[in-house]
Amino acid sequence: MEEREFLQEFVETLKSARLRAMNSGGIVTFRIRDSERAYDIDVPPRKPIPFNVDIYAFHLDQDPETGDHVILFYPDGSMAGSDIEITFDQRRSYRVTINPIFGTVRWFELKS
């Protein structure tokens, strides 16, 4: 149950970033801060990443000032970033995918 709650909150934060960018007309940044095990669209990120969770993201930009890994959401609904893999207890993995054109977010379990 905790896994699903974390995944849902993580995905909802990504969706919120996209909607905020579209509504504000500006770029909104989703951040993952490894050093503090946190993610969010706020600076600094405040939503905790549980200790049994590992997040893998490939080809994410890095904010030179904070070192955060970032996904940028643009006012037209598109984004710059990549898929994210979330692993619980080094056993169960989920892929979070973001459509780069439409910015839609979904997740599914990866089977071994």
Image (cartoon, rainbow, N blue to C red):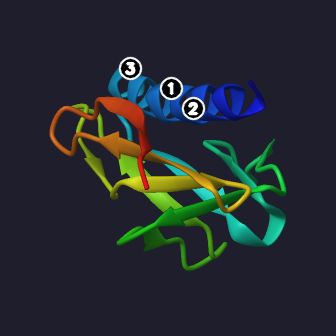
Question: Mark 3 belongs to which amino acid?
Answer: Asn
Q: 62 left or right of 42? A: left
Res 80 → quadrant:
bottom left
Give the left or right position of residue 98, taking residue 51 as reference: left
Per the image, the residue denoted by label 1 is 16
Q: Nearer the viewer, residue 22 or 93?
A: 93
**Which secondary structure lies at badge 3?**
helix
Residue type, mark 1 in image:
Ser
- Report helix, strand or loop for mark 1: helix
In this rendering, the answer to whether 63 lies above or below 87 is below
Residue type at tag 2:
Thr
On the rendered image, what quadrant is the C terminus found in?
bottom left
Task: Determine the residue positioned at 36% across, 32% down.
Answer: 105
Q: Distance of mark 3 from mark 1, alpha carbons?
A: 10 Å
Q: Residue furthest front?
A: 112
Residue at image position (84%, 57%) is 51
* Residue position marked by numbered label 3 in the rendering: 23
| Foreground of the two, 74 or 13 | 13
Say which mark, if any, is on residue 13.
Answer: 2
Image quadrant in which the N terminus is located = top right
Residue 6: image tag: none
- The spot of residue 14 in percent (x, y) is 49, 35
Q: Quadrant of residue 83?
A: bottom left
What crowding class fits label 2: few (fewer than 14 Cα within 10 Å), some (14-19), or many (20 or more)? some
